[in-house]
């Protein structure tokens, strides 16, 4: 005699099948890292770390060194480097939700991808492009070795254009574009119509920020040159300093700090020169306060007319 399966059991089986199907459909796909490790054959580099863990990177060419720099930095902070790349692509909200959407709006507002594409070949020298591509290859190699650490399944491979986009994305933040956009999107006006102060004509504002100064040998008691760099950056995140020493047989020989995703030293020195890059606030942004038509929120008043 055949026994029928109870409806309760049938319901459990159906539920299991549905859950399995949903998991198959919606579960994030695994990153495809096939072929990414092949780039290693193109570079000749050695990474040594001192007592404090600072990487000292030696290569035959500048590109070799940039490749090693990316891999060493990825060993220490791969997540932040990826966040930098995703932010520059305008996809941060896909990882961190709607709170990250203003970043993505800014990326598309500034047309960062278009700007990079338009200038990558013509505005950057072949030597600079080689460094950017090598840096991207270093990240691709690390991703191939550590697929479980990849933030988005389709992130890799990255290219030199992605590396440049990261810098294009960061630069406007140093003259307060993020604050300006925050003000535009706020429910209420954040400031008066004009924030210009009486002493601005002196070039001195009411803010405290980073600074740098140099002292020539003629003005120092020791008869030596001094470079003071006083940069205010957080300990973590996309604008935190990463210390490194870079040395290539082509002449690149420098020590200093750089940001995650940046293939060159921003604050540092070589055997002859020292340099710095600190926050400045040039007047590059104007926000206009418009009167909106109370009968039509899509119109504003300009020269006595609703437009």
Image (spheres, rainbow, N blue to C red):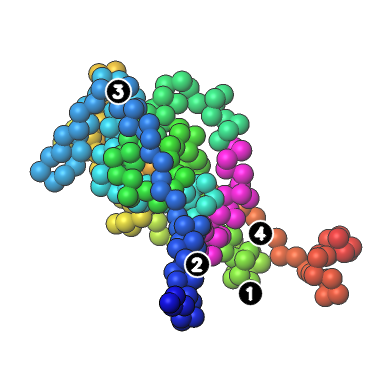
Q: CA distance from mark 3 to mark 2?
A: 46 Å
Q: Residue at x 44, y 75 (%)?
A: 2
Outermost residue, front direction?
1
* Crowd around label 4: few <14 · some 14–19 · many ≥20 (10 Å): few
Magenta span includes 96: yes
- Helix, strand or loop at label 3? It is helix
Q: Residue at x 80, y 70 (%)?
A: 297
Q: How far from the left and from the top, in percent, is residue 233?
A: 34, 54
Q: CA distance from mark 4 to mark 3?
A: 51 Å
Magenta span includes 164: no
Q: Which tag is nearer the camera, tag 2 or tag 1? A: 2
Q: Which tag is nearer the camera, tag 4 or tag 2? A: 2
- Helix, strand or loop at label 1? It is loop
Q: Residue at x 46, y 20 (%)?
A: 126
Q: Which quarter shows the C terminus?
A: bottom right
Residue occupied by mark 3: 41
Q: Which tag is nearer the camera, tag 4 or tag 3? A: 3
Q: Is residue 14 left or right of residue 278?
A: right
Residue occupied by mark 2: 18
């Amino acid at each position: 005699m055949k026994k029928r399966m109870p409806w309760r059991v049938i319901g459990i089986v159906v539920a299991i099948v549905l859950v399995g199907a949903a998991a198959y459909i919606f579960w994030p796909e695994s990153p495809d890292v096939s072929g990414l490790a092949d780039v290693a054959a193109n570079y000749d580099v050695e990474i040594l770390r001192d007592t404090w863990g600072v990487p000292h990177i030696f290569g035959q060419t500048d590109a070799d060194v940039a490749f090693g720099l990316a891999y060493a930095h990825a060993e220490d902070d791969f997540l932040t480097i990826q966040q930098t790349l995703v932010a520059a692509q305008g996809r941060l909200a896909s990882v961190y939700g709607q709170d990250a959407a203003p970043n993505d709006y800014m990326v598309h507002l500034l047309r960062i991808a278009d700007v990079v594409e338009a200038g990558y070949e013509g505005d950057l020298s072949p030597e600079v492009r080689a460094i950017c591509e090598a840096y991207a290859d270093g990240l691709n190699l690390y991703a191939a070795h550590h697929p479980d650490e990849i933030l988005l399944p389709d992130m890799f491979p990255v290219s030199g254009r992605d590396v440049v986009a990261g810098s294009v994305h960061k630069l406007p933040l140093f003259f307060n574009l993020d604050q300006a956009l925050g003000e535009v999107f706020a429910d209420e006006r954040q400031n008066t119509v004009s924030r210009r102060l009486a002493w601005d004509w002196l070039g001195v504002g009411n803010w405290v920020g980073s600074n740098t100064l140099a002292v020539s040998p003629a003005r120092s008691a020791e008869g030596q040159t001094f470079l003071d760099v006083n940069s205010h950056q957080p300990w973590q995140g996309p604008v935190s300093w990463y210390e490194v020493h870079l040395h290539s047989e082509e002449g690149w020989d420098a020590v200093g700090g750089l940001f995650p995703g940046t293939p060159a030293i921003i604050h540092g020195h070589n055997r002859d020169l020292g340099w710095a890059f600190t926050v400045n606030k040039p007047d590059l942004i104007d926000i206009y306060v418009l009167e909106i038509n109370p009968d039509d929120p899509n119109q504003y008043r300009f020269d006595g007319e609703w437009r």
